[in-house]
Amino acid sequence: MNSLTPSQLDLLQRALGPTRVLEEHVLAPYTTFKIGGPADAFYEATSADELSTAIQAARKADIPCFVLGLGANILVGDKGFRGLVIRNAARNMSMSPDGVLHVESGAIVWPDVIRYAIQCQFAGLEHYAGIPSTVGGALWQNLHFLSPAPKRERTMFIDEVFLDALLLTPENTLQQVNHEYFGFGYDQSILHHSGDIVLSARFNLEKGDQQNMNRIVDENLAWRKERHPPLETEPSAGSIFQKIEGIGAGRLIDECGMKGARQGGIEITQRHANIMINRGGGTASDVIKLIERVVTTVKDQKGHILKPEIAMIGEF
Ligand SMILES: Cc1cc2nc3c(=O)[nH]c(=O)nc-3n(C[C@H](O)[C@H](O)[C@H](O)COP(=O)(O)OP(=O)(O)OC[C@H]3O[C@@H](n4cnc5c(N)ncnc54)[C@H](O)[C@@H]3O)c2cc1C
């Protein structure tokens, strides 16, 4: 049931265009897990201006709103989202001659942004090849990757090349903020609790050799192909549980013999014990039940408490 009043819907449609606000729109196709019920209202923003306008319209009409990137780090409830979901497809980008990359926050890190940076011969982002993310999602979580190649065996974080960002604050003002403001950590940034929305960002890249960057991309893609289920045929949300320093959530789950464990349409993949895949028809309720089974089993057998890494969105 749509929770928006006719006057709230009217306000949205006036601000965003009557044909572009979709009612009762199912969210599953917009997530990498292919799970999630309908949003009361759904709008696709194709520029930073449209993103800003949509958020301000929702706030003015007192409508809860959620900004969706590629939906690669979230689980949307089976009952969907009460309010407005804004899919961020603001994807403009440009490069200055000295390697400052300016991107709108809906730009897709791989392949779009990385391919563009390589084409312009600037390095620093190629390490994140193969990870599904918009720029906004990448800053929200401080996108990271443990590089597999020799000499680069350390976790690299996207904030290492981040310069600054233009935010829409909860007070509806525009604010240019620098690296320090974000308080980046492992899977952490101020965006988790500030209510700010990233409209665009700038990255400081260094002159790089195209051949070398393409090699890093190929190595990382090959590494992923070997270890991760392919999203096209085995939808997932990446790692389900937060890292446990020095131990690894996946290893604990594996040691409990839970690879292949199944709940409805959801299965812990044989490839990686910290990844659940949607075998078809999987629901958010299946995911939650399997998460609970894993948490209980790992606690009983290993004495560690696993915590989900993915954000739970909407009604379950
Ligand atoms: C197969 C697979 C592999 C993965 N591998 C990795 C990996 O190696 N390393 C890693 O770090 N992550 C990995 N992930 C997780 C995921 O790719 C990242 O967390 C990614 O940054 C999510 O980006 P998104 O655009 O999909 O964000 P979403 O999932 O759409 O959103 C995540 C959060 O960010 C918020 N958000 C999005 N845009 C904005 C914005 N403009 N302003 C403010 N808030 C915003 C959303 O509201 C939401 O709360 C993987 C995921 C999958 C499915």
Image: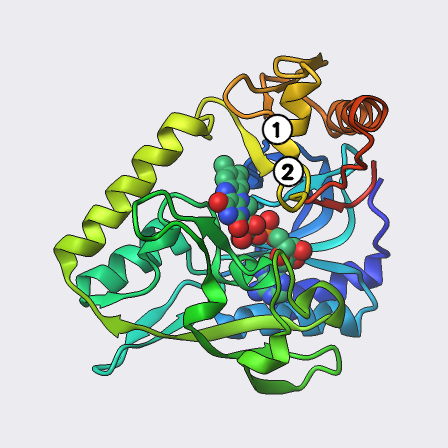
Residue linked to disc 1: 251
Residue linked to disc 2: 247
Q: Where is residue 305 in the image (x, y as percent from the top left)?
A: 81, 37
Q: Is the residue under label 2 in contact with that under label 1 (CB below 8 Å)?
A: yes
Task: From this view, report whether residue 175 is shown above or below residue 204.
Answer: below
Residue located 58% across and 17% down the image: 279
Q: In this view, does 105 lie to the left or right of 273?
A: left
How would you rate the neighbour count of disc 1 (Cα within 10 Å): few for under 14, some for 14-19, many for 20 or more? some
Q: Position of residue 33 (x, y in %)?
A: 59, 33
- Quadrant (top left/top right/bottom left/bottom right) for the N terminus: top right
Q: Is mark 1 on a helix, strand or loop?
A: helix
Identify the amino acid type marked 1: Arg
Task: From this view, report whether residue 99 is shown above or below residue 263.
Answer: below
- Whether residue 111 is visible to the viewer of this picture, yes or no, is yes
Observer-nearest of 37 and 195 = 195
- Whether residue 17 is visible to the viewer of this picture, yes or no, is no
Q: Where is residue 287 in the image (x, y as percent from the top left)?
A: 73, 27
Q: What element carries label 2?
A: loop
